[in-house]
Image (cartoon, helix red, strand yellow):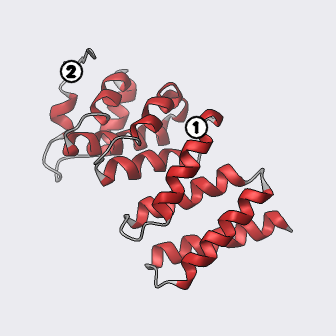
């Protein structure tokens, strides 16, 4: 059985009314008071409000001190295997890796997962946009993967996608063209 240490009041702060909730402020507190292990456990909870808010704060922790999250990358990536994850958990997990490298051991898992997100028109726009960037970043060293992404993105462009996806597709295609020339 997994031991949970929830003594700092972090769970209560995460579930405060949205008007009083500040992810950047809470992230600073988490880092200053070394509450990252507890925040990670809360991010993996089944409670949708708690897990999505915890992941939101983790995103801000990453912005403030990316290296502090590296020991937890495996846990966070493996969590994407869970069924019925809250959209906020998926979005904020992908957000962590759109600007930073994916651990090599999880590249193929995330490629597969991200392609599923990209090709699912019912998926949230931010999830799909972050997934496009992750696939692009993983594919950079491999021209054959860039070509595959290019094909998928051109296929997406045919459909009436939301502006956020169209913009990400357009910019990523430009980036792919630069790398392949």
Q: Which mark is residue 6?
A: 2
Q: Position of residue 103 (x, y in %)?
A: 61, 35
Pair 2/1: label in front: 1
On the image, the x and y values in percent for residue 104 come to 65, 36
Q: Secondary structure at mark 2?
A: loop
Query: Quick check: 140 left or right of 67?
Result: right
Q: Residue at x 19, y 31 (%)?
A: 11
Image quadrant containing the C terminus: bottom right
What is the CA distance from the residue labelled 2 to the residue labelled 1?
Answer: 29 Å
**Which residue is painted at 50% across and 32% down in the image?**
73
Crowd around label 2: few <14 · some 14–19 · many ≥20 (10 Å):
some
**Which of the pair 152/88 is nearer the observer?**
152
The picture places residue 145, in percent across and down from the top left corner, at 72, 57
**Residue, x 55% and y 30% (percent of image)?**
67
> Tag 1: Cα neighbours inside 10 Å, few (<14), some, or many (≥20)?
few
Indicate the position of residue 10 as horizontal and vertical percent values: 22, 29
Quarter in which the N terminus is drawn: top left
Q: Is residue 117 above or below residue 54?
A: below
- According to the picture, the residue beneath numbered tag 1 turns out to be 106
Query: Eyeballing the image, is 88 above or below 167?
Result: above
Identify the residue shown where x is 68% and y is 69%.
150
Q: Residue furthest right?
A: 181
Determine if residue 98 is in view. no
Q: Earlier in the sequence, mark 2 or mark 1?
A: 2
Please state the total of marks drawn on the protein image.
2
Above or below 6: residue 96: below
Give left or right: position of 79 versus 137.
Answer: left
Number of the label disc, if any, that sits on residue 114: none
Quarter assignment of residue 122: bottom left
Residue 148 sits in which quadrant? bottom right
């Amino acid at each position: 059985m997994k031991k949970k240490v929830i003594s700092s009041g972090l769970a209560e702060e995460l579930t405060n009314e949205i008007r009083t909730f500040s992810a950047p402020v809470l992230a600073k507190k988490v880092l200053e008071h070394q509450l990252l292990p507890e925040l990670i456990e809360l991010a993996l909870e089944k409670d949708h409000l708690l897990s999505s808010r915890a992941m939101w704060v983790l995103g801000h922790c990453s912005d403030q001190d990316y290296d502090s999250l590296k020991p937890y990358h495996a846990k966070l990536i493996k969590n994407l295997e869970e069924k019925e994850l809250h959209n906020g958990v998926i979005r904020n997990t992908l957000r962590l890796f759109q600007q930073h490298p994916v651990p090599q051991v999880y590249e193929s898992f995330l490629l597969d997962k991200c392609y599923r997100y990209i090709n699912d028109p019912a998926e949230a726009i931010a999830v799909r946009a972050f997934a496009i960037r992750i696939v692009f970043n993983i594919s950079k060293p491999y021209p054959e993967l860039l070509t595959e992404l290019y094909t998928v993105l051109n296929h997406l462009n045919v459909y009436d996608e939301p502006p956020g996806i169209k913009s990400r597709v357009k910019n990523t295609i430009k980036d792919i063209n630069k790398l392949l020339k």
